[in-house]
Image: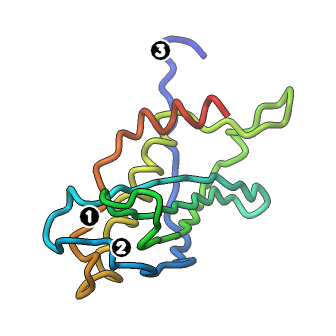
Amino acid sequence: MEMNEQKKAIVYSIKKINILDFGIKDTIHIKKKNQNELFNFNIEFKILFNIENKIIAIQYSHRVQSKNEPTIDIGWLKIQIDFYIKDIHNFINNSNKKVVVPNNFLGNLFDHVISTARGVWFTVMKGTILENAIVPLINTNELIQKENKK
């Protein structure tokens, strides 16, 4: 690519949002209700590709533990967001046929997923003892570095 050649914008949209699972298991380990610092979130992502349908799907899941009992899951959430990518074929490396998503674009997708997960979690936990267990802010650059090491 020449220096004066501009990069094309990636055209994409959210195709589908699925809540795959959520729940509360064991809340006897929560001593107080109104302090977010009482919770640990173990957060994971999984990236799936459906090239034929021009989809990048990102699964987000978290497990919540009380800081008093960090080995016992007391709540969980798992969602998947399917993104339609108009020119997904541009992400395929011709030499090895692997899908390579640009880091800045992957960061945008992660941001959408995290924001959606935060809203879904808040909605499904409203009125429960976990309503104040707010999904923390997440550095998407660190997530991308972790994904690139896989």
Residue 56 screen position, x and y as percent: 63, 56
Question: Sequence order check: which comes first, mark 2 or mark 3?
Answer: 3
Residue 110 screen position, x and y as percent: 46, 50
Q: Quadrant of residue 24?
A: bottom left
- The residue carrying pointer 3 sits among few (fewer than 14), some (14 to 19) or many (20 or more) residues within 10 Å by Cα, namely few
Q: Which residue is mark 1?
A: 134
Considering the numbered disc 2 on the image, is that residue within a helix, a strand or a loop?
Answer: helix
Pointers 2 and 3 in contact (C-beta within 8 Å): no
Which amino acid type is shown beneath numbered disc 1?
Ile
Question: Sequence order check: which comes first, mark 2 or mark 1?
Answer: 2
- The residue carrying pointer 1 sits among few (fewer than 14), some (14 to 19) or many (20 or more) residues within 10 Å by Cα, namely some
Residue at x 67%, y 35% (from the top left corner): 100
Which amino acid type is shown beneath numbered disc 2?
Trp
Numbered tag placed on residue 121 in the rendering: 2
Q: Colour scheme of this structure image?
A: rainbow
Q: For marks 3 and 1, give the one nearer the viewer.
A: 1
Question: Sequence order check: which comes first, mark 3 or mark 1?
Answer: 3
Residue 96 screen position, x and y as percent: 86, 30
State the CA–CA distance, disc 2 to disc 1. 8 Å
Asked whether, in this view, residue 5 is left or right of residue 89, the answer is left
Considering the numbered disc 1 on the image, is that residue within a helix, a strand or a loop?
Answer: loop
Pointers 2 and 1 in contact (C-beta within 8 Å): yes
Numbered tag placed on residue 4 in the rendering: 3
User: Considering only vertical position in the picture, is 23 above or below 83?
Assistant: below
Q: Where's the N terminus, which quadrant? A: top right
Q: Quadrant of residue 121?
A: bottom left
